[in-house]
Image (spheres, rainbow, N blue to C red):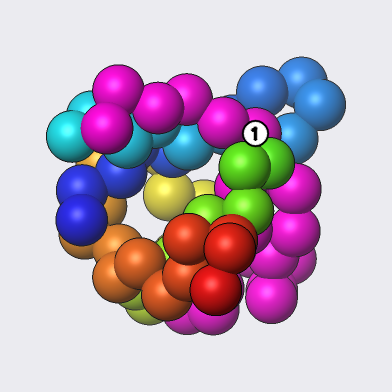
Amino acid sequence: MKITIRKRPDGYEAYVAKKDLEEKIVAMEHETLWGGWIRLANGWTFQMPEGSPDTPMPITVEARKLSSGDD
């Protein structure tokens, strides 16, 4: 699923265009965001692709949805 990640002063935010959903990222497997899972405020969890910590934001990536939060 394509998601757009952007850096905010208080953390990261993700936008899922197919669902017209914009949520704050509330948990990450790795501090650098890349290569692990992220959890959105609504409970959705995504597997992030590998990437460089200095990747310019915003960026659209293909991330695999792991959970809908109600699983």
Residue at image location 62% in from the left, 42% down from the top: 42
Type of residue at label 1?
Lys
Q: Is residue 45 above or below residue 37?
A: above
Q: Is residue 53 visible?
A: no
Rendered location of residue 37, percent (x, y): 55, 73
Badge 1 marks a residue whose secondary structure is: strand
Residue extending farthest right: 10
Residue under label 1: 24
Residue at image location 57% in from the left, 31% down from the top: 23
Residue 23 colored in magenta in the image: yes
Q: Is residue 54 above or below residue 30?
A: above
Residue 38 found in image quarter = bottom right
The residue segment tinted magenta is 19-40
Residue at image location 69% in from the left, 74% down from the top: 30
Residue 24 colored in magenta in the image: yes
Residue 57 found in image quarter = top left
Residue at image location 59% in from the left, 61% down from the top: 69
